[in-house]
C-alpha cells in the first residue's frame, strides 16, 4: 500500500459518530449479490463508504470503497466476491476527513484465520480499551471503535469463534448490532440494551441478517424475527444456534430510529416506522393545532408525520417543497451567491402551491436550526402569507453517544434556546414541538424501553469524554478524498 507520510494533524476522523447499516447472508449461492441488494436498501443509513466481505469456506474476499453502494460495486466486483456467505456495511460519518481505512467491514488475519466485522452503533468505552490494548502492543489500523473488538477477539483464548466473540463483547459497553464472518461461520449480535435494530430473515433456505426489514424486502427474504437484545445468533453448517450469554439489561431501543433514521417502509423493534410517524403527526395536530390552508411536509423525512397532521386537522396535504433525489453530499457552489443555496440544491419551494397561503410545515426534527430557517425563508419567498412550523418530536437537546450522528451539544439549537427563541431564529410565525408524553402516547408510555437521551439528556449507559478522540494520521495518497 502506498501509505504516504504523516500528512495531517487537522481534525481527521474520529470514528465515533457513526450511523450505519449492516447485512449478513449465510447459505446462499449468491451471498454477495444479496448483501449488495441489502446494502442498497440500507443506503439511507450511510452514504460515505460501503463494503462487502464474502467467504467461500476457505478464504475471505473483501471489497470496500468510498461512496454509494451502486458506485462502489460493479458487476465484476460482486462476481469476484464468491462463496455462499457474506457480510456488508454502509458507513456514514461527518467528523473530519473520509477515508477508506475507516470503511467496514474490517477484515483481519489473526492466529485462527480470517475474520471480518461490520458494526452499527457506537462503543462508549472504546478509547479506554484501545489504550489498554496499545499498552500491550496492539497496533491499530483505523480510528473506528469497532477495531477494538477485533483485537479483543484475537487476544481471547476461547475455543470457538462464538466463545471469543462473547469474551470480547463482555469488555465493551455501548451500542452495537454486529455481524462477524469467518470462513465457516456468520455471527450476529445485538447489545444487551438493544439500542440499534437487527432482524433475521430467510430466503430459499438461507439466513439473512439486516439492520432493517426494508433490506429483507429487496433480498426477497421473509421476516422471521428480531435478533433479541443480548442475543448471539450463530449461522454455520449446523444451522442456526442462539445464545444469551450476557447479563440482561433494561432495554433502551433508540427512539430516533422511529423519528428520523429508519426507512418508513421498515418494521423496527416490531412496529411499522411509517405508521409510527403518522401517529406522531396525528398527536402533533391534537397538541398544537393552528388555523391554516395547507399542510406541507419537509421531504422526505417529514412526509408521514405531515400526512398524519393533515388527516387529524382536516387541512389539505400539499407538496409545497419538492426534493431533488439526485444530488449527493458534495456539490460545486456557484461563485455568485444564490440565496439559500445549500437547501435549494435539495429542496425547491413551489410558488404554485404556496402563494397567498397560510402554511403548516412539518419536519421530524430541528438539529442546528439552519435548515428550518432556510426553509421558512424559501416558503415566504414563494409567497406564503404565514408559516407555522410543526416538529414531530420533542426538542433535540442532547448529543447521541450510541450511534446516531448528532453534532456537539453547543451546536444543538435546543440545548441552549427555548422554543420562542428558536421560533425567532427560524423566523416562523409559530413553532411547536411534539411533547415527550405525546411521543410516547403511541409507543406504550415512557416505561416502554426506549433510549430518548437526545430529547431528555437521560443517558442509559455512561460514556467517555469525547475530547480523547483519535485522529487518523496516516493517509494513503491514492485513496484520499
Ligand atoms: P438542521 O438544519 O441542523 O436543524 O437540520 C434539520 C434537518 O436535519 C431535519 O430536516 C432533519 O430531518 C434532519 N436530521 C435530523 N437528524 C439528523 C441526523 N442525525 N443526520 C442528518 N440529518 C438529520
Image: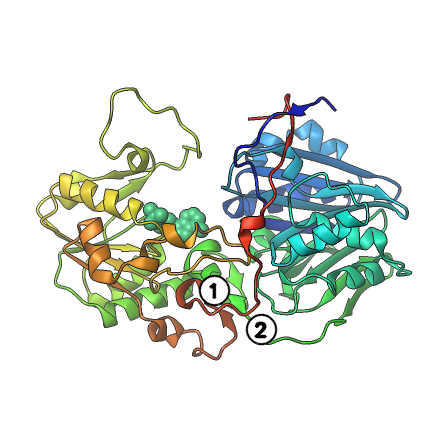
Please identify the quarter of the rendering in which residue 243 is found. bottom right
Location of the N terminus by quadrant is: top right
Nearer the observer, 233 or 239: 233
Q: Residue furthest front?
A: 135
Q: Secondary structure at mark 1?
A: strand
**Residue 479, numbered label:** none
Judging by the rendered image, the residue that carries numbered circle 2 is 251
Judging by the rendered image, the residue that carries numbered circle 1 is 272
* Residue 23 coordinates in the image, percent (x, y): 65, 50
* Residue 267 coordinates in the image, percent (x, y): 52, 62
The residue positioned 78% from the left and 63% from the top of the image is 166
Q: Earlier in the sequence, mark 2 or mark 1?
A: 2
Nearer the observer, 159 or 138: 138
The residue positioned 13% from the left and 59% from the top of the image is 292
Viewed as shown, does residue 14 lie left or right of 458? right
Please identify the quarter of the rendering in which residue 277 is found. bottom left
Using the image, determine if residue 195 lies above or below residue 5.
below
The number of callouts visible is 2
Amino acid at each position: 500500500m502506498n501509505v504516504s507520510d504523516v500528512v495531517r494533524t487537522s481534525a481527521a476522523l474520529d470514528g465515533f459518530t457513526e450511523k450505519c447499516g449492516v447485512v449478513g447472508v449465510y447459505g446462499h449461492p449468491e451471498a454477495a449479490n444479496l448483501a449488495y441488494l441489502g446494502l442498497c436498501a440500507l443506503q439511507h443509513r450511510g452514504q460515505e463508504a460501503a463494503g462487502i466481505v464474502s467467504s467461500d469456506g476457505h478464504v475471505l474476499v473483501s471489497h470496500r470503497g468510498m461512496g454509494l453502494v451502486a458506485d462502489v460495486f460493479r458487476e465484476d466486483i460482486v462476481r469476484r466476491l464468491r462463496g455462499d456467505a457474506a457480510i456488508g456495511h454502509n458507513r456514514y460519518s461527518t467528523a473530519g476527513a473520509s477515508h477508506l481505512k475507516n470503511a467496514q467491514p474490517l477484515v483481519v488475519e489473526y492466529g485462527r484465520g480470517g475474520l471480518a466485522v461490520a458494526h452499527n452503533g457506537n462503543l462508549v468505552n472504546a478509547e479506554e480499551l484501545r489504550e489498554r490494548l496499545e499498552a500491550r502492543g496492539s497496533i491499530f489500523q483505523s480510528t473506528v471503535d469497532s477495531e477494538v473488538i477485533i483485537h479483543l477477539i484475537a487476544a481471547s483464548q476461547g475455543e470457538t469463534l462464538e466463545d471469543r466473540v462473547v469474551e470480547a463483547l463482555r469488555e465493551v459497553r455501548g451500542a452495537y448490532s454486529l455481524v462477524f464472518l469467518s470462513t465457516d461461520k456468520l455471527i450476529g449480535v445485538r447489545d444487551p440494551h438493544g439500542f440499534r435494530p437487527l432482524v433475521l430473515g430467510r430466503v430459499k433456505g438461507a439466513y439473512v441478517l439486516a439492520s432493517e426489514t426494508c433490506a429483507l424486502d429487496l433480498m426477497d427474504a421473509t421476516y422471521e424475527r428480531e435478533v433479541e437484545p443480548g442475543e448471539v445468533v450463530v449461522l454455520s453448517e449446523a444451522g442456526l444456534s442462539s445464545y444469551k450469554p450476557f447479563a440482561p439489561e433494561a432495554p433502551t431501543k433508540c427512539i430516533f430510529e422511529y423519528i428520523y433514521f429508519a426507512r418508513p417502509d421498515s418494521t423496527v423493534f416490531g412496529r411499522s416506522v411509517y405508521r409510527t410517524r403518522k401517529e406522531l403527526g396525528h398527536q402533533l395536530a391534537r397538541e398544537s393545532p393552528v388555523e391554516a390552508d395547507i399542510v406541507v411536509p419537509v421531504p422526505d423525512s417529514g412526509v408521514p408525520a405531515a400526512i398524519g397532521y393533515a388527516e387529524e386537522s382536516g387541512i389539505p396535504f400539499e407538496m409545497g417543497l419538492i426534493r431533488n433525489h439526485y444530488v449527493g453530499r458534495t456539490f460545486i457552489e456557484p461563485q455568485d451567491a444564490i440565496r439559500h443555496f445549500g437547501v435549494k440544491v435539495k429542496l425547491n419551494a413551489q410558488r404554485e402551491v404556496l402563494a397567498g397561503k397560510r402554511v403548516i410545515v412539518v419536519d421530524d426534527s430541528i438539529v442546528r436550526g439552519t435548515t428550518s430557517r432556510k426553509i421558512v425563508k424559501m416558503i415566504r419567498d414563494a409567497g406564503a402569507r404565514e408559516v407555522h412550523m410543526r416538529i414531530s418530536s420533542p426538542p433535540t437537546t442532547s448529543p447521541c453517544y450510541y450511534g446516531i450522528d448528532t453534532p456537539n451539544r453547543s451546536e444543538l439549537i435546543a440545548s441552549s434556546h427555548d422554543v420562542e427563541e428558536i421560533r425567532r431564529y427560524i423566523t416562523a410565525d409559530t413553532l411547536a414541538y411534539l411533547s415527550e408524553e405525546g411521543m410516547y402516547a403511541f409507543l406504550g408510555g415512557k416505561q416502554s424501553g426506549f433510549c430518548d437521551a437526545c430529547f431528555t439528556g437521560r443517558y442509559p449507559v455512561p460514556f467517555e469524554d469525547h475530547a480523547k478522540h483519535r485522529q487518523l494520521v496516516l493517509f494513503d495518497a491514492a485513496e484520499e478524498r
